[in-house]
Image: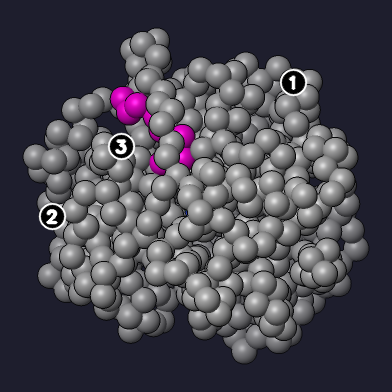
Amino acid sequence: MTVQIDHALEEIRRFRPSPEFAAQAVADARLYEEAAADRLGFWAEQARDLLTWSTPFTQTLDWSNPPFAKWFHDGELNVAYNCLDRHVEAGLGDRVALHFEGEPGDSRAITYAELTAEVKRAANALLALGVAAGDRVAIYLPMIPEAVVAMLACARIGAVHSVVFGGFSSKSLQARIDDAQAEVVITADGGYRKGRAFPLKPTVDEAIEAAETTVRSVLVVNRTGEDVAWTEGRDVWWADQLAAVDAEHEAQGFNAEQPLFILYTSGTTGNPKGILHTSGGYLTQAAFTHKNVFDLHPERDVYWCTADVGWITGHSYVVYGPLANGATQVLYEGTPDTPHPGRWWEIIEKYQVSILYTAPTAIRSFMKQGRDVVHGFNVRSLRLLGSVGEPINPEAWIWYRHVIGGGSIPVVDTWWQTETGAIMISALPGITDLKPGSAQVAIPGISIDIVDDDGTPIEGEGGGLLTITEPWPSMLRGIWGDPERFKETYWEKFGDRYFAGDGARRDEDGDIWLLGRVDDVMNVSGHRLSTAEIESSLVAHPWTAEAAVVGASDETTGQAVVAFVILKTSQADQVTDVVAASDELRRHVALQIGAIARPRQVFIVNELPKTRSGKIMRRLLRDLAEGREIGDTTTLADTSIMQIISEQVK
Ligand code: PRX
């Protein structure tokens, strides 16, 4: 069967890098040539240039047992040393590593020297609790500096961290503790979110109670000062434990393939998968992409990635990439709209943030509020913007560049996954002509191909399935405890190439457009339509703030397009007749894309169902559109949303 995803949404805007930006850009067009001439040599050079090895490697890639890759595997390094000590040794100890901003407004600047000292103590604290190299440690913390310290302390002693997002339930935490058999948990009494202290420790207690694994120690950071229940002999205050141990800790080199972390991500079916990443290759690609995609000038930039450390973006672009590169960054604990809707812009003004990396869902919610909120602050320090997590609608891209970026700075849309560990597809600022809505090109040293269902590369401009044809340094090394599932999920479909699960197409310039997960592709009267394109068309209408599209079964057309739309706050009052509004939006899509894409229904709603990482759960909207009972809502950030939407749709 041939998979062809039709597309008709033409995006013709192009943005050349400004000569001033290009003149100072970190990335050099020669990177593409070097990688094309000798891919493995290119990565070996990056690994040597960007990292410090205690034992140099001699072999770059061992692919003798696919799909189990080994990169730089006869070399040794210490990941924490690379993120900390070596910067201090190079005389950069006084540089701020983290500008921490707590939600209640408390703030703290932590230099590389201070962060190194803290991680050394935390490493000794873990050793004192009997944690050895290879042991798994669960981390369940808010976005506070101790989260970064805890991760690096594990890395420093060769222990494997499993960070569980602080918004997950005790059941999710318990499942992750058990799957990885984590015997030590690092948590806090609580954290701050939406203007309130929320407890974490009780959730940990509940998870441990229910777990099969015996957790012997719980290290508890004092963040909110709320009362917590205490299990003597098991629970230890973080501050007490760190004060009790030696301040000195010498980092030892570990094999490049030493497991660094497990991070759980949900698949389409079954339990969450424990994605395993290792050390040398992961850090190489995280550092390389962080430097080149974000045009990092560590001596002058202030970088801010808004992701929580509970997600892969927080691992690679809050902790490992930026710290390996000696960057100064902002770490913010709370939500964007607490205590006021301009909090992010206030933070950017306060720290003079120059590089911002965030997600389309956040950008669209700011679009919904309107530009006045942003214009209340001076955000002119920004000189580069990044996007990740889902396709960015061209209108959202333009808004981001114009309203946040002042109309002239680069926006890079970065495609990657928990599994890929680091950015795989992105423009390089200063080099690539930017196209709103397209993630554009594979980064140097990465081989991407779009194929049909049989694995035949699609010639020309057709849409198909995104695959990665060659192993890459930061690739997942497996699914924790389940090698079969690793093979089945990613490699069985095509045998010799990695199947990403995303639809994509190339345009006439060879730029890549992501079309959403393959399970989000609709088939309307035999035409494959991507949810992402129709959503972008809807968002391009002046009334729309956000849109989610699903394919609902339809007697005549197989599937029909059903859209759920949130109107902009500024329009909501004017659009009083929802029937007329939905007709107008249907007409708009038909005009923009073609009659085939005209939604059967457009429902005007106030909210969309989202996971805690901000992904729209289209599955639930499909249930609603098809009149079925709504499926499992436990991974929603707010589980009452579907009830509200159902009522609005009625
Ligand atoms: O569907 C793609 C989408 O997010 C998926 C990976 O999700 P996760 O593992 O949670 O990692 C998110 C952060 C890297 C992908 O399979 N995705 C991510 N970035 C983009 C994207 N889709 C389109 N454009 C992107 N820039």
Q: Quadrant of residue 379?
A: top right
Of marks 1 and 2, the one in the foreground = 1
Q: Going by the picture, which residue comes out furthest to the top?
A: 20
Asked if one can make out residue 40 in the rendered structure from this viewpoint, the answer is: yes
Q: Which residues are magenta?
A: 431-438
Dominant SS type (magenta): loop
What amino acid is found at the position of numbered circle 3 in the picture? Leu
613 or 512: nearer the viewer: 512
Q: Which residue is identified by label 2?
A: 59
Against 152, residue 16 (above or below) is: above
Of marks 3 and 1, the one in the foreground = 1
Query: Please, what secondary structure does the residue beneath circle 3 have?
Result: helix
Residue 587: horizontal and vertical position, in percent? Answer: 62, 48
Real-space CA distance between mark 2 and mark 3, rounded to the nearest whole angstrom = 17 Å
Q: Which residue is identified by label 1?
A: 375
| Sequence-earlier tag: 1 or 2 | 2
Residue 101: horizontal and vertical position, in percent? Answer: 73, 36
Residue at 17% across / 40% down in the picture? 35
What amino acid is found at the position of numbered circle 1 in the picture? His
Against 144, residue 20 (above or below) is: above
Q: Is 223 one of the magenta-colored residues?
A: no
- Quadrant where the N terminus lies? bottom left
Q: Which residue is identified by label 3?
A: 50
Q: Tell me if 633 is positioned left or right of 45 in this view.
A: right
